[in-house]
Image (cartoon, helix red, strand yellow):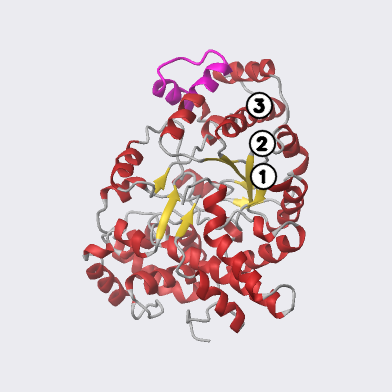
Amino acid sequence: MAFLDDNYLLSTDKALALFQQVRELPIVDPHTHADVGQILADQPFTDLWQAEAATDHYVWEMLRKRGVPEELITGDADCRDKWLAMAEVFPWLAGSPTYEWIHLDLKRQLGIEEPINADNGAAIWEKARTLFQHPDMRPRALLKKMKVQTLCSTDDPADTLEDHRQLARQCPGLVRPTFRPDKAMNIFNPDWRSYITRLERRFNGKFKRIQDLLDALRQAHDWFAENGCVASDHGVETPYGYHVEQTDADEVFRKAYNGRELEPEEMIAFMSYLLNQLAAMDAEKDWVFQIHAGVVRDVRDSLFNRLGPDSGGDVSNHMIDYVEPLTPLLNRFDDRLKVVIYCIEPGHQATVAALCRAFGGKVNIGSAWWLNDSPVGMKRQLEYIGSVDLLANLAGMVSDSRKLLSYGSRHEMFRRTLCDVLGAMVDRGQMPQEVAAEIAVYLCHQRPSELFALGL
């Protein structure tokens, strides 16, 4: 088997046959960090660093591991110098999904097949710069080439969604917003009060009580729905969903609003109350309530102090509990809220699979997320949930990606891994080939389309 050849990640002839049935299916990506302004402007990429690494903390982490100076990662160095520094160490990234994603990007979208290294880094840079000037290399043309049918971005409740509205007039259904209220939820954050001020300005009022905050969030929720939103997304360390009375949550809100220090149990009460209220809004609109739990953010102080969040300093913690804090919410909305649970910690997969099994068809496992988003992580998840929950109830693949070129490569990696897992099951006599094909096609397109009510 040659590097990234037709048999890439496919161990058997049956797996290859399955992949042939899904490889050309349109891409439906219900959770991304798409730059909607970039898609709206439809301007060509200027260079490979901008296209492949300027916003990708997966890449940044790998380059730091190989000793590349921060100036040549997130600093003010010339983009060509950054690319060449990346090319010099790139062979040492082999074995990581980042190595495969970027090579897939170059091979599938640019026709560049040589493995990146110090000797050819400059030549690849120049070739890509020339290619990016072609009209079929602009963002919308690339999305069409990758067969991206629709994707969901990630958006703050304070956003006006103006870029979404303009893009929807030009490309109906291509990009939908997703409601991400983490900044309102994270009352422990030192910037929480300034964010509340931003929300007050957005909705022209002062929040004297927690109901005022909820009213503003509902206005935002309704506005998102008017603009095609079908899901919310909640990034939490621990998924607190306890029942809390509004009077108790209001007392905590007023205390924090006035700048007084909170006790840990007060923060938990506020976050639990707000998460339940947001879940109720989603249930009313039949949105998908996505929850990303288990991330301990920004553990590297020097990185956070210099660059801020989303710079590569987040880790998982196997000690975080899902069952005790989350089951009150799942019970409150049992069978009336569509839930997708993603987890960063591989050890949590067993708990999440068991929870989803216990709560029936409306509570489902999201794709192998973040540090699990690799052939190893996806294979382990698919094999396990197929024996504990139902493989066919996986929510489908999401890229969670910040860069446009990666939608095709990340979905291809998932499809190949899925087909390899299913092909192995066929070889072991666990299911007929025709059933494996039906499941593969369903999970790669129909399942996310139906779950997220995308009308495709």
Q: CA distance from mark 3 to mark 2?
A: 18 Å
Q: Which residue is painted at 61% across and 41% down in the image?
A: 236
> Predominant secondary structure in magenta?
helix
**Left or right position of 7 against 119:** right
Front one among 180 and 311: 180
Q: Nearer the viewer, mark 3 or mark 2?
A: 2
Is 39 drawn above or below residue 405 in the view shown?
above
Which SS class for mark 2?
loop
Identify the residue at the far bottom of this view. Answer: 1
Q: CA distance from mark 3 to mark 1?
A: 22 Å
Front one among 306 and 331: 331
Q: Are marks 2 and 1 in contact (CB under 8 Å)?
A: yes
Which SS class for mark 1?
helix
Image quadrant where residue 121 sits:
bottom left
- Type of amino acid under label 3: Tyr
Quick check: can you spot residue 96? no
Say how many tags the image has.
3
Q: Which residue is painted at 41% across and 50% down in the image?
A: 34
Magenta part of the protein: which range? Answer: 194-216
- Type of amino acid under label 1: Lys
N-terminal of the pair, mark 2 or mark 1, is 2
Q: Which residue is mark 3?
A: 273
Q: Is residue 212 magenta?
A: yes
Q: Which residue is painted at 25% across and 67% down in the image?
A: 129
Q: Which residue is mark 2?
A: 336
**Left or right position of 279 against 26:** right
Q: CA distance from mark 2 to mark 1?
A: 8 Å
Q: Are marks 3 and 2 in contact (CB under 8 Å)?
A: no
- Type of amino acid under label 2: Arg
How many residues crowd mark 1 within 10 Å: few (<14), some (14–19), many (20+)?
A: some
